[in-house]
Amino acid sequence: MTILADWQIERDIKIEPFAPQQKRPGVISYGVTSYGYDVRLGRKFKVFTNARCAIVDPKNFDPQSFIDIEADSCLIPPNSFALAETVEYFEIPRDILCICVGKSTYARIGIIVNVTPLEPEWRGKITIEISNTTPLPARVYANEGIAQIIFLRADQVCRVSYADKAGKYQNQAGLTLPFVPGSSQLPERG
C-alpha cells in the first residue's frame, strides 16, 4: 500500500472544487498538500443539543437532537459535538482507501475531528464529525480547512467496493445523519 503524493491526488482523485494550493493569508489552510488534501467546511451545521432530552441512538436517531445552523462560522458548545458537510465532492477510485484526520490548528485548541474512512468507490460530500473537548465554546469556520484526507493506494483492487455493496452513505449530497438500514428510520439529508 502506498500514500498518494500531491501530483497523484490531482491526477487520480475527482475532487470538486479542487484547490491546487494550500496557503491563504488569514484563512485556515485547505487544498492539496504534499500527501493529502485539506477539506473545507460548508455552511451547514448540525449542533447537538440536550434541550429536548433525546437519546442518541444510531438505530433510531432523533433529528431533534440537533439544532440546524447555516452560517459562515459555528459555535460548538463546551464538551459538545457538531456535524458539518465539506465544500468538496469526492469520487474515490476502486483501488484507493482514504482516511480523514483532523488539522493541527483545530486540534491545538481542543477541537477533534473523528477519524473516518472513505471506502473504495465512495462518492459524495463528506459529513464531518467535530467534537469540542474543551469547557469553553469553540468556533469553527465555513469555507476554511477542517480536516485532511489521506489517500492510500492498495496493492490489489478490492473484490467488493462501497459502490458494489450499495453503501448506505453512497452519493450523499451533503450533511447526512446516521442511520442503520432495516431500522424504522430513514436517512435525513441536510
Image (cartoon, rainbow, N blue to C red):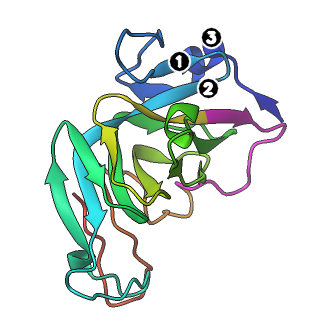
Q: Amino acid at mark 3?
A: Trp
Magenta portion: prevailing SS class:
loop
- Horizontal side of 137 relative to 132 (left or right) equals left
Report the residue at 53% width, 18% height from top. 32
Above/below status of 10 relative to 78: above
Q: Amino acid at mark 2?
A: Gly
Residue 7: numbered disc: 3
Residue found at the very far front of the displayed protein = 135
Measured as percent of width and height from the top left, residue 37 is found at: 54, 26
162 in magenta: yes
Q: Residues within 10 Å of mark 2 (few under 14, many from 20)?
A: many
Residue marked by disc 1:
32
Circle nearer the N terminus (2, 3):
3
Comparing labels 2 and 3, the label whose residue is closer to the camera: 2
| Kind of element beneath mark 1 | strand
Which region shows up in magenta? 150-163
- Horizontal side of 152 relative to 120 (left or right) equals right
Report the residue at 58% width, 34% height from top. 104
CA distance for labels 2 and 3: 10 Å
Q: Nearer the viewer, residue 133 or 131?
A: 133
Q: Are marks 2 and 1 in contact (CB under 8 Å)?
A: yes
Report the residue at 75% width, 28% height from top. 3
Circle nearer the N terminus (3, 1):
3
CA distance for labels 3 and 1: 9 Å
Residue marked by disc 2:
36
Q: In the picture, residue 4 is in which quadrant? A: top right
CA distance for labels 2 and 1: 6 Å
